[in-house]
Image (spheres, rainbow, N blue to C red):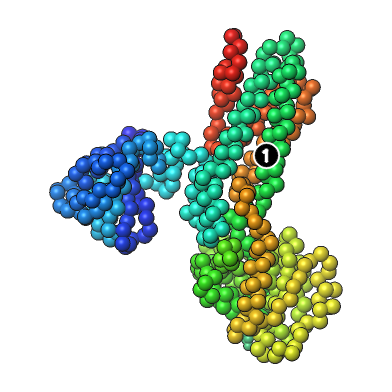
Amino acid sequence: MHPREQTIFALSSGRPPSAIAVVRVSGTEAGTALQKIAGAIPVARSAKRVLLRDRRGEAIDDTVVLWFAGPVSATGEDVAEFHVHGGRAVLNALSAALLSIDNVRPAEPGEFTRRAFENGKIDLTEAEGLDDLIHADTDRQRRQALRQLQGLLGDRAREWRRELIEASALIEAGIDFADEGDVPDDLLKPAMAKIARLRREIEETLAASAQSERLRDGLTVAITGPPNAGKSTLLNRLARREAAIVSPHAGTTRDVIEVHLDLDGYPVTLIDTAGIRETDDPVEQEGVRRARDRAASADLVLWLADDDTDDVGPSQTIGEGGAPLWLVRNKVDLSGPENDGANPRQLEADLGQGVSTRRFRISASRGDGVDELVAALTAFSDTWFGSGEAAVITRLRHRNILRDAAASLAKAEDLVGQGDELVAEEIRTAVRLIGRLLGRVDIDDILDSLFRDFCIGK
Ligand code: GDP
């Protein structure tokens, strides 16, 4: 049997041991699994308490099971759910019982979602939304992923595609009818008016997208400065602010070089460039290379220096995009509050024009001024991410496809009068592109629409 037709199962809840674990089974044998292990298939969509038994009749666990008959299920196939006690022995016993059934195997990563997609339960943008939802760290990211999962982009794209196919069908019909190859105006005009409107809509959607991509990827802040300025100390202090932390994890080297903050729902990653150092370990080298790239393309740079030095920031531009630079004077506990740090006029001269900068004075080890710095970072995030709430494009993939589709439509508009076949071809390209956005590529749709709507009688 082809792997795609086999029945799959997986632990869908978190890592054991846990109070309850959910094992999902999807495929034609899901019902068999319930019959063999739970004794019977329960009424669809209602929880039933049963004693699970293995092949020899030994009790596995006292649990709840659920039955979703396809196609009205998450994957579109028959689905069984076992809500067992989440101990490893229970899960092992249940796995063994499932594996003893013919054509039942463990699922590959993402295979449930893949089946849902293949069975037309979700489109590709919704699958991406699901992925984003699972990986959302902050509340704002969660809301955005949920909007995408609910199909906002997919709905819009489906509608665009439908209308494009209609416009395309009008033009193709005209080509078929016209003797000289010129589409009559009464077919071409409405079709092109529609094309122009759709192009504008796609362009407007693109214009609103930058912020939601940002929200998905997060804001990256690089902490730079001379050795011993206190970069690691500052990072560690921020990492200890429990309320702010999403997932502090060890970086690529043994030093912690990245800290993930949730600042008022905005995902912010701080990178300590001090942790980026030379190493002979090839695995570490790759990590170091990535960390360096990330720091170089940071969205904001903090330059940390001792409060009592004349250091006025980096001698060369950090970051490719001319990211804003904040000058952070550290160790004010040593210099005292009366010290005003660097000479502001010299600072401006050294930094040149066009680089926006702010100044802070902190003590990374004692904590003075750190709250102000965090508040400023939060305010910066607020501006940088924008509201983003209305935008529907969250990935570069979406943006590239829609940009190409809008370009094809613009070309189609330009080509009017120079050959209607060329116009039709550009529109077909746009239809194909938007189909790719949804994960559906079906050129026959155009012909279907043509035949359905026009009854040309050929
Ligand atoms: P890095 O090389 O920039 O990462 O600097 P570190 O964080 O390793 O700090 C260098 C040294 O400065 C350490 O001995 C820290 O304890 C000390 N240090 C860092 N921040 C402060 C501070 O605010 N006040 C004082 N007095 N010492 C600090």
* Total numbered labels placed on residues in the image: 1
Examine the rendered structure and indicate whether residue 385 appears above or below residue 209.
below
Q: Is residue 412 visible?
A: no
Ligand 1 contact, mark 1 (Cβ < 8 Å): no
Q: Residue at x 67, y 43 (%)?
A: 205
Q: Residue furthest left?
A: 57
Mark 1 residue element: helix
Q: Residues within 10 Å of mark 1 (few under 14, many from 20)?
A: some
Q: Is residue 194 visible?
A: yes
Q: Residue at x 68, y 45 (%)?
A: 206
**Looking at the picture, how far across and down is residue 126, in whole percent?**
51, 44
**Looking at the picture, how far across and down is residue 56, in whole percent?**
14, 48
Examine the rendered structure and indicate whether residue 80 appears above or below residue 426.
below
Disc 1 marks a residue whose amino acid type is: Ile
Figure quadrant of residue 296: bottom right
Q: Give the quadrant of the C terminus.
A: top right
Examine the rendered structure and indicate whether residue 131 appears above or below residue 192.
below
From the viewer's side, name the closer residue of 401 and 360: 360
Q: Residue at x 67, y 13 (%)?
A: 176
**Looking at the picture, how far across and down is residue 262, in whole percent?**
56, 66
Kindly identify which residue carries mark 1: 202
**Looking at the picture, how far across and down is residue 240, in whole percent?**
52, 76
Q: Give the quadrant of the N terminus.
A: top left
Figure quadrant of residue 456: top right
From the viewer's side, name the closer residue of 363 and 145: 145
> Ligand 1 sits in which quadrant?
bottom right
